[in-house]
Image (cartoon, rainbow, N blue to C red):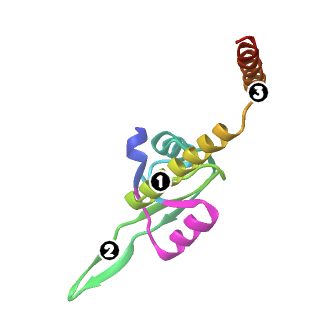
Amino acid sequence: MNVNEVIKYPILTEKSEISRSTNNVYTFAVDRRCNKIEVKKAVEYIFDVKVEKVNIMNYDKKPAKLGRYQGFKNAVKKAVVYLTQDSKIFLFAEEAEAAKKESHKEKEAEKEVKSVELTEAEKKAAEKIAKKASTKKSEK
């Protein structure tokens, strides 16, 4: 089965949002013909994350009524995907923008720390330059 056909859409319910924000667990509706291994490969390929484990649930079709008409709701196969601690999937554009801003701030903070802290080689080079400058001044 093609990797792009495995995952249909994310399931966005209150329970799935709580587990997504606290436990790094995501819920997707998947194709009825796929298995855990295919779901794991598809999530890792599409979202570029590391999957820890996958649980799958099959829901049968349910009878439904709309006015005087009767029918059935579609059968669904759900996959609960557990990601590793360092992996994250951004389902909304706002989350992605916030993460970019946060990473940008972290990079700026690292640059500031690096500019303040000198390595040993840089310290030795600065001392040599200072010695040369002092000897030139004393010669004049």
Kindly report which numbered mark, 2 or 3, lies closer to the viewer in this rendering.
3
Mark nearer the N terminus (2 vs 1) = 2
Quarter of the figure that contains the C terminus: top right
> Of the residues shown, which amino acid type is indicated by label 1?
Lys
Please, which residue is most extreme toward the top here?
139
Q: Quadrant of residue 49?
A: top right
Q: Which residues are magenta?
A: 9-27
Mark nearer the N terminus (2 vs 3) = 2
Kindly report which numbered mark, 2 or 1, lies closer to the viewer in this rendering.
1
Q: Is residue 137 shown above or below 90?
A: above
* Image marks 2 and 1: residues in contact by CB distance under 8 Å: no
Kindly report which numbered mark, 3 or 1, lies closer to the viewer in this rendering.
3
Q: Which mark is drawn over residue 4?
A: none
Question: In front here: 10 or 73?
Answer: 10
Q: Which residue is mark 3?
A: 123
Q: Which residue is mark 2?
A: 72
Q: Is residue 115 left or right of residue 44?
A: right
Q: Which mark is drawn over residue 101?
A: 1
Q: Is residue 83 shown above or below 48?
A: below
Q: What SS does tag 1 mark?
A: helix
Q: Residues within 10 Å of mark 2 (few under 14, many from 20)?
A: few
**How far is mark 3 from mark 1, CA to CA?**
33 Å
